[in-house]
Image (cartoon, helix red, strand yellow):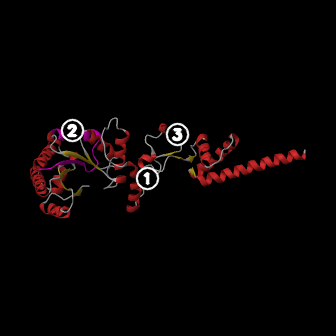
Amino acid sequence: VQTCALPISTRADIDRAWAALAGAARPRIHVFLATSDIHLEHKLRISRAQCLEQVTMAVGHARRYCSDVEFSAEDATRSDLAFLCDVAEAAVRAGATTINLPDTVGYALPADIDRIFRTVGERIGHQAAMSAHCHNDLGLAVANSLAAIQAGARQVECTINGIGERAGNASLEEIVMAVEVRADVLPYHTAIHTPALVPTSNTLSAIVGVSVPPNKAIVGANAFAHEAGIHQDGMLKHEQTYEIMRPESVGAAGTRLVLGKHSGMRGLDARCRALGHRLRQPELERLYVRVTALADRTKAVDDLQLTAIIREELLLVAAGTGAAQGDAACH
């Protein structure tokens, strides 16, 4: 396990970072400095030449302490690309072993990421590993991270549940499972134990007090839930008709066939059988009418509600049978 500290690019902050890391088995110092003109002019108030000097100083100072040094060009995706290449080259010359090109404000499109990573990668060659750090302001953090991987990045900075500044960072679980599921075009290995994804997501949610949206990819409560009748019919015939990964592969409890107003007869029958009730077609049809009517009011029908309706229907059937037998006896 690596232990990393993230100081700003000043000697004093780098010194403090090393004081915190000195006892670590595998320490890394990760220094950063903005490189876009808007940050240089309005935030840092330095020139491009001064930026290059500070990058060289910061990386060199960090290397005096640690052989593993990462440099991040903050706001890389809004930086002049030729200047960004100069910065990356200067960082590598000073001893950086990883060059991180963050999409700090979530501005880039995948095509931008591809162009930036390939261009910088051509400049620095194999002298340092390339890293991506994408924010989700336009909802493209995962797509941009995957584009970076395809363009040569071998490190991705991401977070469980996509937590982070503003709209968040790239979701670890989505990147990992994209690599797992689409190995045909993403032939890489992450070493992540994927059955721990959902439990880890749940633990983090409990710690930070922020719930995951039910429709969140991979770890959301509805990620493996199916309500539409045509989907349920397909799932009952073959799971891969509507699921591209097994729920168990990410630590989810399993597939759920949700009874709602869009559910079909096959889904209802399967749910009844799972509860131990094998209904004849006329009984199933009456039950279907009642279940869809309830779902129209409550959105979904849970097992307790379904069981109650089944019992009522069975009682009606029993009462009807008894009445019919009584009539026959009278005659």
| Relative image position of residue 324 (x, y in whole percent) | 82, 46
Give the mark nearer the N terminus: 3 vs 1.
Answer: 1
The region drawn magenta spans 95-122
Give the answer, above or below, for where 250 lies relative to 20. above
Q: Secondary structure at mark 3?
A: helix
Other residues around mark 1 within 10 Å, as few (<14) / some (14–19) / many (≥20): few
- Residue picked out by circle 3: 235
x 54%, y 47%: residue: 258
Furthest toward the top, the residue is: 184
| Residue that carries the numbered disc 1 in the rendered image | 213
Residue displayed at 22% across by 50% down: 75
Drawn side of residue 196 relative to residue 281, left or right: left
Left or right: 193 in relation to 11: right
Is residue 236 in view from this perspective?
A: yes
- Alpha carbon of mark 3 to alpha carbon of mark 1: how far? 24 Å
Q: How many marks?
A: 3
Location of residue 77 in the rendering, given as x and y in whole percent from the top left corner: 23, 45
For residue 218, say whether it is visible.
no
Crowd tier of the residue under label 2, counting other residues whose Cα lies within 10 Å: few below 14, some 14–19, many 20 or above:
some
- Name the secondary structure under disc 2: helix
In the image shown, does 103 or 227 lie closer to the viewer? 227
Task: Depth check: give the residue in front, 276 or 100.
Answer: 276
Q: Which residue is mark 2?
A: 118
On the rendered structure, is 168 left or right of 94? right
Give the amino acid at mark 3. Answer: Met
Task: Look at label 1 and name its amino acid.
Answer: Pro
Q: Position of residue 13 (x, y in %)?
A: 16, 62
With 196 as the anchor, is 232 left or right in this view? Answer: right
Q: Nearer the viewer, mark 3 or mark 1?
A: 3
Along the polypeptide, which appears first: circle 2 or circle 3? 2
